[in-house]
Structure formats: structure tokens, C-alpha cells
Amino acid sequence: MRKICLLFLLMVSITLCLFSSQEKKEEANVVALIGGTLIDGTGASPVQNTTVLIEGKKIKAVGPMDKVKIPEGAKKINVSGKWILPGFIDAHMHLTYPADDRQHFTQTDSLATLRALHFMNMYLRCGITSVRDAGAPVEPMMALSKAAQLGYIDTIRLFSCGQLLTTTGGHGDGLKQSRAVDGPWEWRKAVREMHKAGFDHIKISPTYTMEEAKAAVDEAKTLGMRITSHGGGLSDTTPTTMTRIAVQAGVQCIEHLNEMEDDVLDLIAEKGVYIVPTISIYREQYKENDMNRILIEKRGWTVSLHETLFKKAMARKITMGIGTDAVGKFMKHYPKIYFMEMKYFVELGANPMEAIVAATRNGALILGKEDVLGTIKEGRLADIQVVNGNPLKSLDVLGQPEIVIIGGTVHDFK
């Protein structure tokens, strides 16, 4: 009995030591960014000489240098003369999409996973700390999410829609990144399967009926998933109806500023639906004569069509995020196309602060993560970048951050 008691006491002692060691480790995981000018992502004016205190994965405190107490033992990083911003969010990318369309049917899930990781790491280096994948094969997305949970990979946050859901003959049908389903019950089942696979987001794509779109929206919201829709395009009807159906069905976001009527924009504004316009990729497609000829010759599409819609959306105060959607041969434009999109916002009437808000807070709103991402506030996840220059004077300073922090983990690129 004496031996058993001694063994028990020894085990308790070891356990307490382990807890104490873990607590000390957590206490030591405190980082302070000191002296920088803060753009917090809310649209508020910049604040000079700030301290951002990070404890563990979250922001513990934000404020003037003389007001934020830095605990003993914290890692202090002097960022005087630098600018502190939230990490950026790409709200529309296809991480597994091959640069050569012929590879769609030959690339393995393993190669698709490595391709996605390549772009995620590229984004990390550029200050983009979260990405929403708007359609990919299930296995690579599941593998990347699980690897991040297990700590096997140290990269940006991934929010995946899983496979794009469309109808037979609809937009994306036949690609590995999509699934064709027909009728309301098939749509419900497909949403359930994406949820079962671990995804919190769903993207639907025309051509669908109102009944199909409503079924997908209802199922997604029942399961607590975010749902977005491809906005018309080549798969739309004439006159256009698909974006109207999606908004009336209750989607939370529309991807792309494609051909649509003013009253649909009014409906989007009224219902508080978000838009990810992806206008830069359209401009590149027109430049390279890669836009479908039917859209140009029969539907009258031009660059100005998308630009006019953007200005109309801005006038209606519709919340818009930054998304790229550069697929196939246009993947050569990564990562610069993200910053091209921000500059295009400014070219079309937004100011630099509004472009930054689109890349941060608005991205978090689109993800449904506004309480944890997109802004530098107490209690938010510590997804932060430090740049050497004033982005309000020139967006050219973006894309080459000296420091990127994701969930409290510091990546120093100086």
C-alpha cells in the first residue's frame, strides 16, 4: 500500500510539473509590436506610436505605447516607422486549379494538395493570411485542413467550399472541383455531404431553378454553413435571371460582377448580400482575348460592363471583398493580382483605406468571421502584418511585409 501511495504522489507531482511547465510556456508566448502606426481594418484613421500586445493566439491589448503594459518576459519587436495592418483575406481563389487546363483530368489529389500548399505559402509571404477556396476536389481540402489542425503545416488559414455545386450542364460541370446535382433533394444531399466532409462554406453555380437554390440555401443555413453563388456569366439565361434567383433564394454573397440589372443590385443592397467582384481577372481576360466570344459578340460584354457595375455597387454601399479567381494560365499573375485588385478598387472610385477595409474587415464579414478576423482589436485572432511604408499614400508598399503574424506565430521576413 505504501508503494502505491508513493507512486500516486509521484504521478501527481509529475502532472503538476507538466501543467506548471505548460503554463510558463503559455505565459512566455507574449509578443509586443511597439511604436508602429496602426491601421486596424475598421476604416478608422491611422494611430501613431501604438503597441499591439499578443498573448498566445489572440490580441491581448491595443493602444498608445504609454497605455499598454507589456508583461515581463514578453518578446518586444520595435516597429517604429512601420505600419501595422490586419492580415489580408482572399475571398475567392481556386488553390488546386492547374495552370494548364489539360491537367484537370490527369493531376492526382496529391499533386493538387501540394499545389494548394504552394499558393498558401506564397500568400503567407505577401501578408495574405486567409483564403476562401471557392471550389476544389474534396480530398486535398480535407487533407490541408486536417494537416493544419494537427500542426503538420504552418501556413495561412483555409476556408473551403469543397466542391462547387452545379447542375448537369451548368457552370463547372465535368471538373474535379465541381459536382453536378439535379433537383432540390439532390442539392440538399450534396450540401450535407460537403458539411460531413468538414466544410463550413458552400458555393453554388448556375444554371439552377429557384427550388434548387432555395433547397441549397435552406440546408446550408440549417447546418450553420455560409453560402455563396457564382454570379451568372455564360451559364446565365437571356435576359439574365441567375443572380436574381440566388439573391431571392437567400445566398449571403455573390461571386463576380457579371451582367445584371439595376433592380438586382437594389435587391442585393436591400438584403445585405456581399459581393466579391473579381474585376482584375476580367480585365486580364479581355487583354489576352480570352473572354468567351459569345459573351462579347452576342451579349455585348466589355471591360466597362464590370466597371460600371462596380461603381453602381459602390453607390449602393454594397459591402465588397477582395477576391482573385485567376485560374488556368492566369495563375501566372499570382500573387500580384491580389494587389492589382486592391488598386483597381481605387481606380474605380474607392479610396486606399476603403480598399484596405475590403481586404480585411469585409473579407471577414464574407467569411462570417468578423468577430475573430479582419480587424486588430482586443480578443481578435492575431493575424497581422507589418509593412515598411504608408499604404494610404501608395498601395505599392503592400505585398512585401517585413513581419507576418498568424495566430500569434511570428514570421520574420526582414
Image (spheres, rainbow, N blue to C red):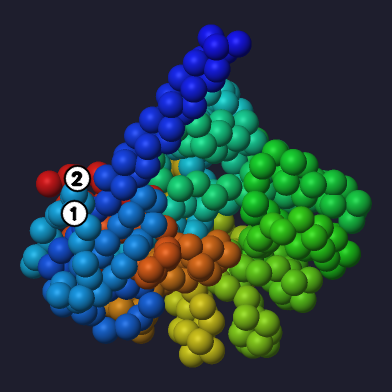
Q: Quadrant of residue 322?
A: bottom left
What amino acid is found at the position of numbered circle 1 in the picture?
A: Glu
The residue carrying pointer 2 sits among few (fewer than 14), some (14 to 19) or many (20 or more) residues within 10 Å by Cα, namely few
Q: Position of residue 358 (x, y in %)?
A: 41, 71
Do we see residue 290 in this rendering?
no
Q: In this rendering, which labeled residue sits more in front, label 2 or label 1?
A: 1
What kind of residue is marked 2?
Asp
Q: Which of 203 and 330 is in front in this view?
A: 203
Q: Residue 156 carries which label?
A: none
Residue ID at (85%, 46%): 189
Left or right for 339, reference 312: left
Residue most toward the left? 81
Q: Which of marks 2 and 1 is nearer the N terminus?
A: 1
Report the side of 152 relative to 33 (left or right).
right
Q: Nearer the viewer, residue 180 or 290?
A: 180
Q: Which residue, as the protein is rendered here, is positioned at the far front?
A: 2
Question: Residue 103 versus residue 334: which sits nearer the camera?
Answer: 334
Residue plotted at (70% across, 68% down): 251
Left-right relation of 272 to 148: right
Q: Distance between the residues labelled 2 and 1?
A: 22 Å
Residue designated by label 1: 72
Name which quarter of the figure residue 366 lies in. bottom right
Say if mark 2 contacts mark 1, CB within 8 Å: no
Query: Which mark is drawn over residue 412?
Result: 2
Q: Nearer the viewer, residue 185 or 201?
A: 201
The quarter in which the N terminus is drawn is top right
The reply to whether residue 70 is in sight is yes
- In the displayed structure, 288 sits above or below 390; it is above
> Residue 115: where, in percent of width, then height?
44, 33
Q: What element carries label 2?
A: strand
Question: At x 76% / y 56%, what residue is drawn?
Answer: 223
